[in-house]
Image (cartoon, helix red, strand yellow):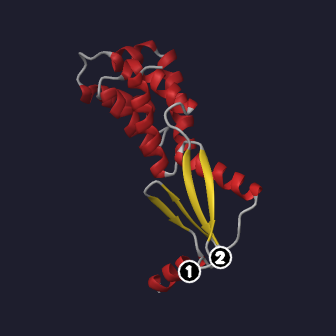
Amino acid sequence: MTSLAQSYAKALQIVAGAEGSYDKTKEEMLAISELLRTNTELRSAVTDRLVPSASRFQLISDALGGKVSDLTNTLVAMIAGAGRGGNFEDIVAAFVSGQVGGTQIATVRSAVALSEDQKARLAQQLKSSIGSEVQIQNIVDPDVVGGLVTTIGDRVIDGTVRTRLERMKSSI
């Protein structure tokens, strides 16, 4: 796996994770990779750097024809537009295999200690959302009244009862 493919795959992982659609994006990218593998005419047009990037973008959009999410369409167009269509299969392979990042630490504050089963289920849910392995570090915080506050890097997911009530209050 080339460092170029890993760099693009990492970008895909970050964007798909931020949008909370890692699993869907992964499925769609695999389908597009298969399409490019089997459709030699499309693959030739997308990988030819002499074809203007706007044309490559249009070719991809036309071929996908609304069959994938806007996010996936944009990501594929970005790769093709940057002249990296020839690396598409390697990029998707790195993205799908998860060989682009290490395990991330998720700090989870809760009123009571989480069981190993709860940690495993939470780690699985976070993995499908952000696209990389997650290790749960549980901190018991008596100030948390129901729910969890999860921090992964600079991202905070506040699912506490207090926050939910504040959101309902502000929407009224």
Residue that label 1 marks = 162
Residue 166 place in picture, x, y as percent: 50, 82
Label 1 sits on what residue type? Answer: Arg
Who's the residue at 39% across and 31% down the image? 7
Residue 98 place in picture, x, y as percent: 55, 34
Residue 89 as seen in the image, left or right of residue 48? right
Categorize mark 2 by other alpha carbons within 10 Å: few (<14), some (14-19), many (20+): some
State how far apart marks 1 and 2 are (Cα). 8 Å
Q: How many marks?
A: 2
> To which quarter of the image does residue 87 belong?
top left
Label 2 sits on what residue type? Answer: Gly
**As drawn, 117 above or below 149:** above
Question: Which secondary structure lies at badge 2?
Answer: loop
Q: Which circle marks residue 59 in the picture?
A: none
Who's the residue at 31% across and 31% down the image? 58
Who's the residue at 30% across and 23% down the image? 83
**As drawn, 76 above or below 69:** above
CB under 8 Å between callouts 1 and 2?
A: yes
Q: Nearer the viewer, residue 56 or 162?
A: 162
Residue 145 place in picture, x, y as percent: 62, 79
Who's the residue at 49% across and 47% down the image? 17
**As drawn, 72 above or below 115:** above
Question: Which secondary structure lies at badge 1?
Answer: helix
**Which comes sooner in the sequence, label 1 or label 2?**
2
Q: Nearer the viewer, residue 155 or 12?
A: 155
Q: Nearer the viewer, residue 39 or 12?
A: 12
Residue 63 place in picture, x, y as percent: 42, 28
Residue 111 as seen in the image, left or right of residue 61? right
Residue that label 2 marks = 146
